[in-house]
Structure formats: C-alpha cells, structure tokens
Image (cartoon, helix red, strand yellow):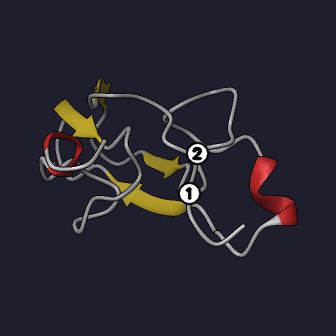
Amino acid sequence: MDKPVRAAESPFAIDVEQGKSYFWCACGKSAKQPFCDGSHKDTAFKPVKYEASETKTVYFCGCKVTQTAPLCDGSHKKTG
C-alpha cells in the first residue's frame, strides 16, 4: 500500500483539549477516523501525533493527502 485510503470527503471537526495528545490516522484504514486504531500495521504508514496547545476545535484531514498533516489544508477540494 503506497497511497493512503481516502477516509472522508471533508475534514473532521474535533474539539481538542489543551495538553492532550491525539494520533491521526495517516493510512486511512482506521475504523475510528480521524484517529489511529492500529490498522496501519500492514502498511508503510505511521500515525501522526498532534499535541493540543490550547482547547479549541481543529480540523483533522479526512482525505489523507494534506501537506500539513494532521490538519486539513484544503487538499480534499483539489483531489477526488
């Protein structure tokens, strides 16, 4: 598997808590999108750690082709 699975057509809006770490699924195979559930084990992908510097809503990438992983950069609008 050299390309990630497109998990969603838009980003996932998630309320994060300051000081907490989140592990974004980079392969797209996780059943717990946008977070890792270990499904990447048979791939070359690894989850991306996100550390919340403040409590707020962030937008985790769903299309898995963002250039600013793990956050959405609008790439879902350019790919299909």
Q: Is residue 7 left or right of residue 55?
A: right
Kind of residue indicated by mark 1 = Pro
Query: What percent of the width, then of the height, locates residue 27?
Result: 61, 55
In the displayed structure, would residue 42 be above or below residue 55?
A: below
Q: Quadrant of residue 4?
A: bottom right
The residue nearer to you, when weighing 47 against 10, is 10
Question: Residue at (54%, 30%) from the top-left corner?
Answer: 33
Q: Could you tell me residue 67's position as x and y percent?
A: 23, 68
What is the secondary structure assignment of the residue under circle 2?
loop
Give the tally of numbered discs. 2
Would residue 73 appear left or right of 23 to someone viewing this image? left
68 w.r.t. 22: above or below:
below
Are the residues flagged by discs 1 and 2 in contact, CB closer than 8 Å? yes
- CA gap, disc 1 and disc 2: 6 Å
Crowd class of label 1 (few under 14; some 14 to 19; many from 20; radius 10 Å):
some
| Quadrant of the frame with the C terminus | top left
| Residue under numbered circle 1 | 4
Residue type pointed to by label 2? Gly
Report the side of 36 relative to 25 (left or right).
right
Please name the residue shown 20% across and 36% down the image. Answer: 58
Quadrant location, the N terminus: bottom right
Q: Residue furthest front?
A: 80
| Residue 51 spot, x, y in % from top left | 35, 56
Q: Earlier in the sequence, mark 1 or mark 2?
A: 1
Which mark identifies residue 54?
none
Question: Which residue shows up at 21% across the image and 47% down it?
Answer: 72
Which disc, if any, is residue 28?
2
In which quarter of the view is residue 32 placed? top right
Q: In the image, residue 64 lies at what x, y percent?
A: 41, 52
The residue positioned 63% from the left and 68% from the top of the image is 46
As helix, strand or loop, the secondary structure at mark 1 comes to loop
Q: Dot 2, how many residues are within 10 Å of its Cα: few (below 14), some (14-19), or many (20+)?
A: many
